Image (cartoon, rainbow, N blue to C red):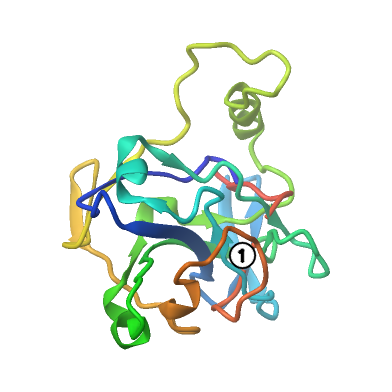
Amino acid sequence: MFPTFQVKLSGLDPLADYVLLMDFVPLDDKRYRYAFHSSSWLVAGRADPAAPGRVHFHPDSPAKGAQWMRQIVSFDKLKLTNNLLDDNGHIILNSMHRYQPRFHVVLVDPRRDSERFAHQNFKSFSFPETQFMAVTAYQNHRITQLKIASNPFAKGFRDGEPEPWCGATLSLPQATIQDKGFSAPHFQPLPYPPPSVYMGAKPRASPYPLPALQPDGFGYGQQ
């Protein structure tokens, strides 16, 4: 996914284990098309049936709070696809549909009765700045150039290029998001399964019945 989703965390228990994961939810029930003559996105009809719901675990999960807070956390391994038959664990999205990425922090609770505290052991965050249009081909050649320039594995990559994405700051347990002056609580509980499912989970990418969506072949359609 480009730009790469990056966050900086603070306020975690340095000695506790946490799992970080992401999922994607549709922003509306519409399908779009890009109008080149007006350089804008237009509604082209109702949305396609929702893609299979999946979540993406950060590959370092679970890890101590101290490790997560040490540096910016990057989800650079997250991949998007529009292949409904994908068996690589990628996030499946419908092309030409709008999505909101969601970031989840889950405390690995060692208590035997951890399920009783499941809804106290996780926080969910949504950044309006990260909403995007899923596309299989960029509608703007400058976005393609920016992605190539920002890819360390791409030919012609040059050191010193500006980062394509600014990090945000998440403060737990207050769950306050601060990004470019924006400060507001964004807490949305996972619909199902309960967060206890992730307690002690090992990093893996596999389907879960969350509200829709996953990886490669997509990008951000921008005007």
Give the left or right position of residue 42, taking residue 120 as reference: right
Frontmost residue, 186 versus 122: 122
Q: Position of residue 51 (x, y in %)?
A: 68, 74
Residue 193 at x, y percent in the picture? 50, 84
User: In the image, residue 130 lies at what x, y percent?
Assistant: 43, 52
Give left or right: position of 56 versus 83. Answer: left
Q: Nearer the viewer, residue 186 or 104?
A: 104
Q: Residue at x 43, y 36 (%)?
A: 165
Say what secondary structure mark 1 lies in: loop
Indicate the position of residue 161 as horizontal and vertical percent values. 50, 16
Q: Is residue 47 visible?
A: yes
Q: Does the image show residue 223?
A: no
Residue nearer the viewer, 116 or 7: 116
Residue on which the image places disc 1? 97
**What residue sits 45% from the left and 21% below the top?**
162
Please identify the residue farthest to the right as the structure is shown: 85
Residue 198 higher or lower than 221, as above or below: below
**Is 190 above or below relative to 216?**
below
**Amino acid type indicated by mark 1:** His
Q: Residue at x 48, y 31 (%)?
A: 164
In the image, is 23 to the left or to the right of 217? Answer: left
Quadrant of the rendering where the C terminus is positioned: top right
Residue sitting at x 48%, y 60%: 21
Q: Residues within 10 Å of mark 1 (few under 14, many from 20)?
A: many
| Residue 12 higher or lower than 147, as above or below | below
Q: To which quarter of the image does residue 119 belong? A: bottom left
Q: How many marks?
A: 1
